[in-house]
């Protein structure tokens, strides 16, 4: 069985990468913009982008949403919730009820 590595692409920053999906995200650029610390650094790239897309970059902003609302964001799945819950708890916060 052979697997296709996808088509060769070049991002605006000149990074070459292979993608087999229509996703336009350059893995090199995405790795470079990943935060070094904080709760966003603990999430997968799609989950991080989903929160950023909705303007959620602090735990205080995250605490204004319910778990159900967060799960509705494209890119957030059930695996992200324990990470988010723990981060909130460490700061004395919780999801909105």
Image (spheres, rainbow, N blue to C red):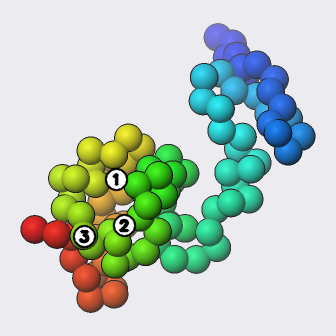
Residue 83 badge:
2
Q: Which mark is residue 23?
A: none
| Left/right of residue 58 with respect to residue 67 in the rendered view | right
Where in the figure is residue 43, as x and y percent of width and height? 48, 60
Q: Do the residues labelled 1 and 2 touch (CB within 8 Å)?
A: yes
Say above or below: 32 vs 15: below
Examine the image and state in which quarter residue 32 appears: bottom right
Does residue 40 appear left or right of residue 92 in this picture? Answer: right
Nearer-the-camera pick, 5 or 68? 68
**Callout 3 crowding tier (Cα within 10 Å): few <14, some 14–19, many ≥20:** some
Which of the two labelled residues, at mark 3 and mark 2, occupies the earlier sequence position?
A: 3
Question: Is disc 3 placed on a helix, strand or loop?
Answer: loop
Report the quarter where the N terminus lies: top right
Q: Nearer the viewer, residue 2 or 51?
A: 51
Left or right? Give the position of 54 relative to 96.
right
Q: Mark 1 points at which residue?
A: 79
Picture residue at 67% right of the left edge, 17% below the top = 3
Q: Mark 1 and mark 2: span between their CA atoms?
A: 8 Å
For the C terminus, the quadrant is: bottom left
Residue, disc 3: 64
Determine crowd level at label 1: few under 14, some 14-19, many 20+ residues with C-alpha closer than 10 A. few
């Amino acid at each position: 069985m052979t697997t296709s590595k996808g088509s060769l692409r070049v991002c605006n920053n000149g990074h070459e990468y292979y993608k087999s999906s229509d996703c336009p995200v350059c893995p090199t650029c995405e790795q470079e913009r990943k935060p070094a610390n904080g709760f966003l650094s603990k999430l997968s790239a799609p989950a991080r982008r989903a929160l950023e897309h909705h303007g959620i970059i602090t735990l205080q902003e995250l605490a204004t949403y319910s778990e159900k609302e967060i799960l509705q964001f494209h890119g957030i799945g059930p695996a992200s919730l324990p990470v988010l819950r723990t981060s909130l708890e460490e700061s004395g916060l919780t999801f909105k009820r």
